[in-house]
Image (spheres, helix red, strand yellow):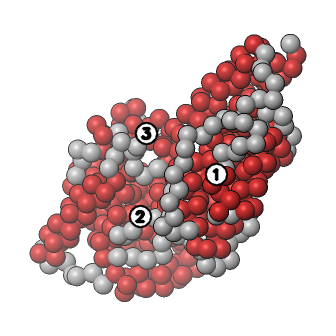
């Protein structure tokens, strides 16, 4: 790619600010990968704010993590795009907090930002045709020496391994396995449930008025929670559940910290040689 | 509980949970996330167990009758934890559809819980649902 060219030219027609941030990130990827990550993070934040304004109502937190979470829960950002946006957010935050960004990491995120950009354009202008060419990695201003090339190779391998471990964590947390056809499973379960419901009805169980049940349950719950017989259990359950949930969150945070440390260790080795 | 039994228990959890989510007619991302968090944070399954439990060999050949039968054979404490988790999935979208009520009722019958125990599970479920979901977050 020549110096005057950019992968992100197409963005100009859709969002000038996002296009500008993308171009800046592209410019810094070799010379200042930390700044590249700042720009990419800001780019994702600008995208998230725009999507939130366009597609969501109500008071959405301005924190990027929360905003992405809300967009994902609302079905506005698909899983693949959300994963990439979260990865940029995480690495951008790490750079802001002093963890050095290796060039291969910044390049990887830049390439992901390119893919997200194509999807983003379609979201902000419905029906628009965006045909993305293959991402062309910007060339370094001066050719890399052998040692740097080797280091970049190692960092790329590490990034692959981190990505794979993150995917495993993510897949383990989801309701369906990666190989399952969700529509097919849903159809089968719905059929079975309806059949069981018919059997129950035939056996003389009353037809369910779900709204009424929900209302009664909600009213009951308020009373039950105030009842000392259950109140104690509730408080204990909350404490226990909170502790367990905190344990999982801590475990996930520690793993992210370990990923960063592995990366930093590689960079430091290079600096010490 | 040995490794195979733990995988079977986890399969029962994922099958019960997804049935409740599907009974609600719309699959919300918040329910997806809550299912895995509950599996790991409350039921104590590892990532590996969760993945194996959702493997086609374990889950795709099981019907809802198998699920009810499996839950019935679990120790009472574990069965109640499944019921609590399933109710949490149901509360996640703050609505109840007829098939959700039916599934909860069938699970409760399989476990043979008393009304008091069932209410306790519901209270705990609501507590956990409110914890797993950020305040005021949209679905």
Relative to A117, is B118 on the left or the right? left
Q: Secondary structure at mark 2?
A: loop
Position above or below: A273 against A13: above
Say which quarter of the image contains residue A235.
bottom right
Position above or below: B8 against B125: above
Q: Residue at x 84, y 37 (%)?
A: A32
Foreground residue, B91 or A113? A113
Chain ID of residue with mark 3: B
Say which quarter of the image contains residue A242.
bottom right
Query: What label sits on residue B27 in the rendered view?
Result: 2
Q: CA distance from mark 2 to mark 3?
A: 20 Å
Q: CA distance from mark 3 to mark 1?
A: 24 Å
Q: Quadrant of the C terminus of chain A?
A: top right
Q: Quadrant of the N terminus of chain A?
A: top right
Residue linked to disc 3: B51
Residue linked to disc 1: A85
Position above or below: B115 against A47: below
Say which quarter of the image contains residue B16.
bottom left
Chain ID of residue with mark 2: B
Q: CA distance from mark 2 to mark 1?
A: 22 Å
How crowded pointer 1 is (Cα within 10 Å; few <14, some 14-19, many 20+) is rated as: many
């Amino acid at each position: 790619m020549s110096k005057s060219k950019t992968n992100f030219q197409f963005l100009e027609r859709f969002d000038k600010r996002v296009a500008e941030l993308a171009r800046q990130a592209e410019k810094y990827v070799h010379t200042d990968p930390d700044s590249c990550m700042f720009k990419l993070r800001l780019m994702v934040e600008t995208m998230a704010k725009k999507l939130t304004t366009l597609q969501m109502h109500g008071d959405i937190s301005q924190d990027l993590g929360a905003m992405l979470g809300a967009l994902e829960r609302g079905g506005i950002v698909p899983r693949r795009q959300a994963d990439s946006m979260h990865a940029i957010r995480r690495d951008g935050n790490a750079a802001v907090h002093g963890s050095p960004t290796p060039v291969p990491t910044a390049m990887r995120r830049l390439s992901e930002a390119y893919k997200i950009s194509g999807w983003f354009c379609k979201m902000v202008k419905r029906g628009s045709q965006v045909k993305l060419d293959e991402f062309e990695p910007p060339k370094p201003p001066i050719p890399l020496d052998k040692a740097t090339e080797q280091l970049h190779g190692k960092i790329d391998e590490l990034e692959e391994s981190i990505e794979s471990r993150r995917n495993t964590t993510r897949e383990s947390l989801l309701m369906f396995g990666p190989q399952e056809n969700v529509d097919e499973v849903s159809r089968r379960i719905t059929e079975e449930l309806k059949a069981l419901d018919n059997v129950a009805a035939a056996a003389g169980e009353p037809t369910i008025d779900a709204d009424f049940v929900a209302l009664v349950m909600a009213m009951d719950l308020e009373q039950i929670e105030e009842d000392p017989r259950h109140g104690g259990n509730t408080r204990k359950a909350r404490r226990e559940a909170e502790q367990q949930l905190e344990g999982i969150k801590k475990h996930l945070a520690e793993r992210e910290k370990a990923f960063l440390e592995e990366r930093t260790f590689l960079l430091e080795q290079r600096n010490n040689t | 509980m040995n490794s195979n039994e733990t995988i079977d228990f986890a399969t029962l959890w994922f099958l019960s949970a997804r049935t409740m989510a599907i009974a609600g007619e719309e699959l919300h991302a918040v329910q997806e996330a809550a299912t895995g968090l509950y599996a790991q944070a409350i039921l104590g399954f590892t990532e590996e167990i969760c993945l194996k439990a959702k493997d086609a060999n374990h889950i795709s050949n099981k019907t809802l009758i198998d699920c009810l039968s499996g839950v019935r054979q679990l120790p009472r404490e574990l069965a109640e934890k499944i019921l609590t988790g399933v109710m949490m999935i149901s509360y996640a979208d703050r609505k109840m559809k007829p098939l959700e009520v039916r599934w909860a009722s069938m699970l409760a019958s399989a476990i043979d819980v008393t009304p008091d125990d069932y209410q306790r599970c519901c209270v705990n479920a609501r507590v956990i649902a409110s914890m797993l979901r950020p305040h005021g977050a949209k679905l």
